[in-house]
Image: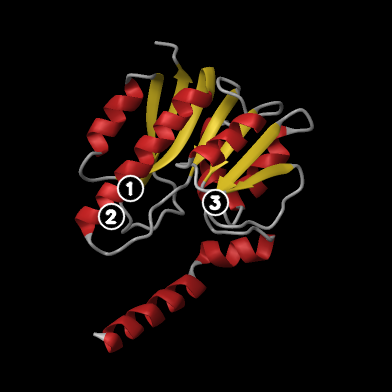
Amino acid sequence: MGKKRTASSKRWIQEHENDPYVQEARRLGYRSRAVFKLKEIQEKDRILRPGLTVVDLGAAPGGWSQFARPLLGKNGRLVALDILPMEPLPDVEFICGDFRENDVLEKLESIAAPASVDLVLSDIAPNISGVDAADAAASSYLADLVLDFSQARLKRGGMLLTKVFQGEGYEAYVRALRAQFATVTVRKPKASRPRSREVYLLARNYGVL
């Protein structure tokens, strides 16, 4: 069992090192390959614009915030949140904590009041255990929390871009979004690994039905 895990770890490291998105992120000075997922969605959907207030959930190591902040201009605002520490980024307000906890939510509310946010970004994923049923349940739980958070923080007409995993609960989640947002679009960026069940749901025009 131990040998198998070691071989698997070595294979993952080798695949990671050979990944063109990893190499390009390093070349351009981005903090993670995940930047290219947001970049592709931005090029297609133009969700980031000057003057917006944006909350980035599950932000560490900071790739999405790093890409998004310059596009918001001097009048924009970006609040990033993660349970893990994150190296500071210029003009990004960072909260380190678990957004499931009241004291963290209170801290966030002191920075971004309810119904004050134009766009919620979420690239949150659970720690993967390898047990499909447990991973699906953990992922669904986080996705539900992201939606609850968005309902409390988004302005009327606001947007949510969130990562979800296809499988049990996926269709119900899409229906829940469609009940709250005027349009819901599925995006599978090229930088998402083909074998991954992750997709991104872009929900627009919150409360405009």
The residue that disc 3 covers is 36
In what quadrant of the picture does the C terminus appear?
top left
Q: Who's the residue at 37% across and 43% down the image?
A: 142
Q: CA distance from mark 3 to mark 1?
A: 22 Å
User: Residue 28: which disc?
Assistant: none
As drawn, the residue found furthest toward the bottom would be 3
Observer-side mark, 3 or 2, equals 2
Residue 157 is situated, as x and y percent measured from the top left of the image, at 52, 16
User: In what element is the residue under mark 2?
Assistant: helix
Amino acid carrying label 2: it is Asp
Q: CA distance from mark 1 to mark 2?
A: 6 Å
Amino acid carrying label 1: it is Ser
Residue 22 is situated, as x and y percent measured from the top left of the image, at 54, 65
Amino acid carrying label 3: it is Phe
- Circles 1 and 2, Cβ within 8 Å, touching? The answer is yes
The residue that disc 1 covers is 139
Residue count near mark 3 (Cα–Cα under 10 Å), binned few <14, some 14–19, many ≥20:
many
User: In what element is the residue under mark 1?
Assistant: helix
- Circles 3 and 1, Cβ within 8 Å, touching? The answer is no
User: Residue 135: which disc?
Assistant: 2
